[in-house]
Amino acid sequence: MDSDPDEIIAIYRQRWEIELLFKQIKQNFPLKYFYGESANTIKIQIWVTLIACLLLIVMQRGLIHSWSL
């Protein structure tokens, strides 16, 4: 209870941004199953999904009209 209210607000905003990213990933790139069983294969698939999501965000922000895919 000794935390500064502004610090708590900043942490909550960061958490909310992460939640929005997860929501967008679930909607645009559903990971219904993984293509491999090793930890490395799963990490690679998650990283590729994150990179694709980032590219989609960059492309949407660069467009005059924001379209939904």
Image (tube, grey):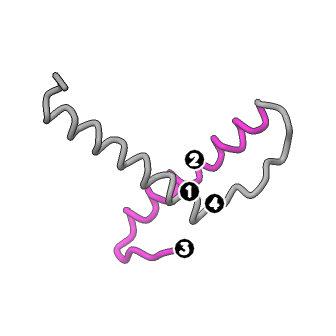
**Depicted 62 relative to depicted 8: above or below:** below
Residue stretch rendered in magenta on the structure: 40-69
Tell me which numbered mark, 3 or 4, is placed earlier along the sequence.
4
Tell me the tag on residue 69.
Answer: 3
Which residue is the site of mark 1? 25
Tell me which numbered mark, 2 or 1, is placed earlier along the sequence.
1
Q: Helix, strand, or loop for circle 2?
A: helix
Tell me the tag on residue 29.
Answer: 4
Under mark 4, the amino acid is: Phe
Tell me whether the residue at label 3 lies in contact with that at label 4, contact meaning CB atoms closer than 8 angstroms: no
Q: Helix, strand, or loop for circle 3?
A: loop
Tell me which numbered mark, 3 or 1, is placed earlier along the sequence.
1
Dominant SS of magenta comes to helix
Dot in front, 2 or 1: 1
Residue 36 drawn at (x, y percent):
85, 41
Residue 39 drawn at (x, y percent):
77, 31
Under mark 3, the amino acid is: Leu
Residue drawn at (54%, 73%) of the image: 69
Tell me which numbered mark, 2 or 3, is placed earlier along the sequence.
2
> What is the CA distance from the residue labelled 2 to the residue labelled 4?
9 Å
Tell me whether the residue at label 2 lies in contact with that at label 1, contact meaning CB atoms closer than 8 angstroms: yes
Q: Is residue 48 magenta?
A: yes
Under mark 2, the amino acid is: Leu
Dot in front, 3 or 4: 4
